[in-house]
Image (cartoon, helix red, strand yellow):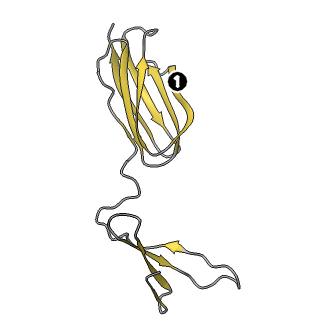
Amino acid sequence: VDWFDTKTSTFFLTDTVVSNSVTLEINVPPIQSDYAFIITKIGSTGIAGFTDSKFNFNLKQNFPNPFNSKTRIAFSLPEISKVNLKIYNSLGEEVKSLITNEIYNSGEYEIVFNSEELPSGVYFYKLQTEKFSQTRKMILLK
């Protein structure tokens, strides 16, 4: 603890693990009992434009598109998520499940979709998590 403001019950801490010092402001509310109190994070980190993750939920356009037999599907996650990635035909019928209820950490991912058993046509791929859902179109030419 660098210092404590008794009027606002606020601690000011400096994180010295990172190369640049980061100030973290923590508000300590009144004590709830003789032995317990709650600490909550408030305010800013002091870094302009800082977010908790460098990633956003995003489903990218497959590449190549149109494609012949194989294509890459990339997506990013800002937080740990249960992921589903499914392929649908133009009638909305599921034809392939690439990822089913798998837990992924925050980060960027790329899946290779092998469509050898499918006929030429328009297909849709859908990424779904607890907090995000996005669908994109792709064209298979054989």
Residue at image point 30% right, 62% down? 49
> Is residue 121 shown above or below 36?
above
Amino acid type of disc 1? Ser
> Is residue 18 shown above or below 92?
below
Q: Position of residue 134 (x, y in %)?
A: 41, 36
> Is residue 9 shown above or below 127?
below
Residue at image point 63% right, 79% down? 37
Q: Position of residue 63 (x, y in %)?
A: 30, 25
Residue at image point 49% right, 26% down? 86
Q: Which residue is mark 1?
A: 97
Q: Nearer the viewer, residue 92 or 121?
A: 121
Quarter-wise, where is residue 138 in the image?
Answer: top left
Residue at image point 43% right, 16% down? 114
Q: Position of residue 75 (x, y in %)?
A: 39, 36
Which element is circle 1 on?
strand
Q: Total of numbered circles in the picture?
A: 1
Residue 67 located left or right of residue 93 = left
Q: Nearer the viewer, residue 108 or 122?
A: 108
Quarter-wise, where is residue 127 in the image?
Answer: top left
The quadrant of the image that shows the C terminus is: top left
Q: Residue furthest bottom?
A: 7
Q: Residue furthest right?
A: 34
> Is residue 36 shown above or below 18?
below
Quarter-wise, where is residue 90 in the image?
Answer: top left
Q: Nearer the viewer, residue 20 or 64?
A: 20
Q: Position of residue 135 (x, y in %)?
A: 40, 32
Residue 92 located left or right of residue 38 = left
- Mark 1 burial class by Cα count in 10 Å: few <14, some 14-19, many 20+: some
